Every structure is written in C-alpha cells, then in structure tokens.
Amino acid sequence: MKHSVAAHAEMAYVQGIRANLGQFVQQMIQVFFVGLVIGMERNVLPVVASEDFGVPKTSFLYLMSFVISFGFVKGILNFVAGRLSERIGRKAVLLTGWIAALPIPFLIYYAPSWGWVVAANVFLGINQGFAWSMTVTSKVDITRAEQRGFATGVNEFAGYAAVAVAGVATGYLSHLYGPRPALLWFALAVIVVAFAWALLFVRETLPWARAESRRHADGSHRGPRPRFPQGVPDHPGTWEVFKLVSFRHPTFSALCQAGTANKVADSLLWVLFPLLLHNRGLSVVQIGWITGVYGMVWGASQLWTGPLSDRIGRKMPIVTGLWLLAAGVAAVTLVSGATAWATAAAVMGVGMALLYPNLIAAVADISHPNWRGSALGVYRYWRDTGYALGAVALGVVAQLAEGIEAAFWFTAAVLLVSGAWMLLRAEETHPRLNPSDD
C-alpha cells in the first residue's frame, strides 16, 4: 500500500514544462508583476532626484544610496528566502514578498526627503528578494535539467521585459500626471493584483523538488547525472551551504563573482546611465526609450540565449556575455546621439541576456534538489549584493573623478576581469555535456 501511494506521488510530481505548463505560465505572470515594480523606478527616480528631493547632481554617492539600500537588503533576503522556502514552501515566501511591497508607493509619494526613498527601497529589496527568487526556484522545481536554460531564460525575459515596459510607462505617466502620483497608482495597482493572483492561482512546487531528490536517492533518476559537489551531507546546514557556494567550490564561486560583476554593471545602467543621458540634453521620455531598449533587448534575447545554453553549455555564453556587456558599457562614453546610445544599450542587452539566465541555470545544474533553493539563494545573495557594492564603488569613482564617465570605464574593466575568472576557474555544468564521473 505504501509503495503504491509513493508511486502515485512520484507520478503526480513529474518534471517537465509540458507536464506543468499551467504553473509554468503562472510563474511567468508573477515575475512579470515583480519586474513592473522594480522597473517603475529605473527611469523616473534618478532624473527627479535633484528636482524633487534636492540631491546635488554632483553628489553621486548620495544619489546611489537608494540602490545601496536595495542591494544589501535584496542580497540578504535572497539567501533567507532560499532557506525559508525549503521549510515553509515557495508560495508562502512569494506571498510574503508581495505583502512587503505595500509600503513602497506610499513612502515615495509622501517622501519629504531622499531618505524616505532609501527606506522605500529597503521594502523593494524584500519584495524582490522573496518574490523574484521564488519564481526562479519554482520554475527549476518543475522543469527537467535539460530545460533549465530555457526555463530561466523565459523567467528572466518576462521579468526584464516588464522592467522595460514599466520604464516607458512611468516615463509617460510622469509626464502627464507628475512623478509621484504616477509611481503611487502604478505600483499600488501592480502589487494588489499580483498578491491576489498569486493567492488564487499559484501552486506550491516544493513537492516536485522532494520527488526529484527521492529519484536521485533510490537510483530511479533517468538521464545524465549532474556534477553535484562531493562530500556534502544530504541536508547541509545554512553556513555549510553558504561556504560551499561562496568559496569552497571553484565553479560555484566563479558563478557568484560573475553574478556580482553583472549587478555592478546594472547599478551603473540603473542610475548613472539615465543621469548621463539627462546631462547630455535628453528628455525623460527619450531616456525612457533608450533605457527601455536595454531592458527589452535583454528580456527578449533571453528567449534564445537560455535555449542556446541547453544545446552548447552554460560556460561560453556566460563568458561571451560578460565581455559583450563590457564593450557596450565602454561604447556609451565614446558615442553621442540618441541612435548611437540606443545601439550601445542594445549591445549591453544582448550581453546581459547571454550571461544572466545561464548563471542561474548553471547554479541549478550542480545544486542537489535537497538544498537547491539554498544554493540559488547564496548565488543570488552575491549577485544582488553587487547592486550595493557596485553603487558604492561607482559612486566613489564618479565622485573622485568629478564625472560620470570614469564609472563606465571602471565597470568595463570589472566585467573583463570577471569574464577571465569565469573562463579559467569554472567547469561546464550542463549534465549532458559534462556529466558526473560516478
């Protein structure tokens, strides 16, 4: 009797996109909502910081403070979300993320000073750390290993397409109604609808991860065996997972540093890229379209860069993406005119698309299902702490150089070094192309 119940449970939790298409689509909808929340800030806040909040245009470190608060909080909460999701489930963490988002529009709308915006971004960090993390983890739970590049590509496409849509939409809404009312009503509508949608339609996916773990344990797993790290307990402790992914395992650590480097670049493009364009005479709407090109190309390109890594592996797309992103960042300072800046933004978008979903897929490839949520949380901790580290470093560089351009060259150098580290230190993680020796 017990055997038949267990067999039925295994059949109920079959992995694969086709078998779980309904929930796969639901997770896409959720990450689209998450992208709208962060995207609403990307165009408007850097430009109005001096006009509405009195942030001096040359006080780059002060301007970056709202990204610093966001990055540190999101980084830590990514790790917390990963561990928590293995205890209370993915859906509960997702819903908590939406509840945490509720203060954001009110803090920005009623803000008497820039400090309130910094506080709002603490809640934004909680929302993104909990909600976006769970969309990734849930998709990995319900898909097979050979589909993870596609799954993470689709996930990040949906999220960053929403970032681009929100950037353009809030640019127009701000022009029509003013920045604060635009952000208030846009954010409030997204948060309320997203919470209700998750509550009603999203299923818990932790049982899929547990079923996969049992198949690995009893030998019924089919297909190539992933290169899980050796000598790790079945249920390692929090600190043990953190050390393994951050420092002890050379491939994990190379993936973590690449994640950090890409968020240094994203900090630059979030705050200093719109400011540079504004300083060179572009309107808020023009800036919205150019930064939207970056987000749209990044988002749409992941529909082919994720599947590409399912065929040729994760490593070379990641390395190529880091170096292509470096080239686009450097080009911003060498060209002028809206068309040229939009072209540079497109190059950066392709670079991001090559590396971003495939870093997640690579971490998932070599993480055991018992602690995959935690491993993804550690990676996302280092990746999104890159927002804060990048904001501090870029703010200091721009402040010392008394100009934004130096921050672009600093970022390009970081990306070049990161690509070299990845090339020299990381193994290919795709289980079909580099299966376990066992």
Image: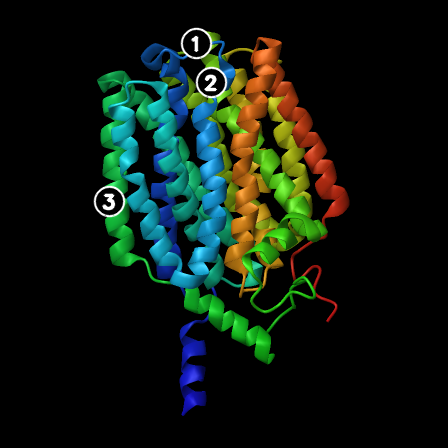
The total number of labels drawn is 3
Instruction: Specify the label residue 193 is tagged with.
Output: 3
Instruction: Using a 10 Å C-alpha cutoff, classify the residue at mark 2 as few (fewer than 14 neighbours), some (14 to 19) or many (20 or more).
Output: many
The residue furthest right is 424
Compare marks 2 and 3 and give the one earlier in the sequence: 2
Task: Give the alpha-carbon distance from disc 2 to disc 1, as whole Å.
Answer: 8 Å
Q: Amino acid at mark 3?
A: Val
Q: Are marks 2 and 3 in contact (CB under 8 Å)?
A: no
Front one among 139 and 390: 390
Q: Is residue 254 above or below residue 9?
A: above
Residue 371 horizontal/vertical position (percent): 54, 61
Residue drawn at x 57%, y 42% is: 382
Q: Nearer the viewer, mark 2 or mark 3?
A: 2
Q: Residue at x 56, y 31 (%)?
A: 389
Helix, strand or loop at label 3? It is helix
Q: Is the N terminus in the top left, top right, bottom left or bottom right quadrant?
A: bottom left
Give the SS element for disc 2.
helix
Q: Which residue is mark 2?
A: 62
For label 1, count other residues whose C-alpha is less than 10 Å away and answer few (under 14), some (14-19) or many (20+): few
- Residue at screen point 64% across, 40% down: 257
Residue at 68% across, 45% down: 254
Characterize the local packing of mark 3: few (<14), some (14-19) or many (20 or more) Cα atoms within 10 angstroms.
Answer: few
* Cα distance between the residues tagged 3 and 1: 36 Å
* C-alpha separation, residue under disc 2 versus residue under disc 3: 33 Å
Name the amino acid, label 2.
Answer: Tyr
> Is 44 displayed left or right of 264 in the figure?
left
Residue 92 percent location from the top left of the image: 34, 57
Residue type of the residue flagged with mark 1: Pro
Q: From the viewer's perspective, is residue 94 above or below residue 51? A: below
For the C terminus, give its image quadrant.
Answer: bottom right
Q: Residue furthest bottom?
A: 1
The answer to whether residue 220 of the structure is visible from this angle is no
